[in-house]
Amino acid sequence: MGGALNVRPVTDADRAAWEPLWQGYLTFYKQELPAEVTDITWIRFLDPVEPLHALVAEIDGQLVGLVHYVLHRSTWARDCYCYLEDLFVSAGVRGHGVGRALIGAVETAAHDAGASRLYWLTHETNTQAQELYDKLATRTGFIHYGKAVE
C-alpha cells in the first residue's frame, strides 16, 4: 500500500470514482440495482437534510473504499442510533486497515451526532470481514429477517 490513508465525506466530484466501488460492493453480495436507485442514493448523500451519509477512503488521490451510514431514531433510546449500511474496500488494499479506518470514521460521526449505538450486519459467509468485526464490536446474537413490501 502506497501513501497515507485519508477518510472523508464524499463530494459531488467523487461520483465517477465512487461508482466502481459501489458496483463492486453490489457484485460481492450478488445484487443488482437499477441505475435510478443508484442516482437517487447519490443525490441523498449530498443532501444535508438527509440522514443518509457516505464516506470514502483514498490513498494517493485514488478511492479505495466506501462506507454508507444512516442516523435514525430508536424506540429503545433517548438518542439516535447509527446503522452502518454498506462497507466496501477494494481487493488490493484489504487487510491494510482501510475497513477499520472507515468504521472508525463512522463511529466518530455517530458520536458527533449524539448517537448511543453503532451497529451493522454482514452475511454469514463473509468470514474475512467478520474477523475484523469481531475485534471492533460485539455480536449481538440477533437473527436478521427481511421481506419485500409489496
Image: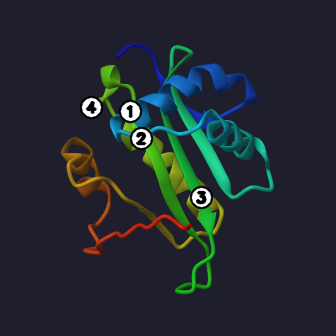
Residue displayed at 34% across by 69% down: 144
Question: Where does residue 33 sit, x and y in percent of width and height?
Answer: 53, 39
Secondary structure of the residue carrying numbered label 2? loop
Mark positioned earlier in the residue sequence (2 or 3): 2
Quadrant for the N terminus, please.
Answer: top left
| Horizontal relation, residue 31 to residue 36: left or right | left
For residue 31, which numbered disc appears in the image? 2
Q: Amino acid at mark 1?
A: Thr
Mark 1 lies on residue: 27
Alpha carbons under labels 4 and 2: distance apart: 24 Å
Mark 3 lies on residue: 70
Mark positioned earlier in the residue sequence (3 or 1): 1
Quadrant for residue 18, please give it. Answer: top right
Q: Nearer the viewer, mark 4 or mark 2?
A: 2
Alpha carbons under labels 3 and 1: distance apart: 22 Å
Secondary structure of the residue carrying numbered label 4? loop
Secondary structure of the residue carrying numbered label 1? helix
Mark positioned earlier in the residue sequence (3 or 4): 3
Tell me, yes or no, whether the two marked residues, 2 and 1, touch with CB atoms within 8 Å.
yes
Alpha carbons under labels 2 and 1: distance apart: 6 Å
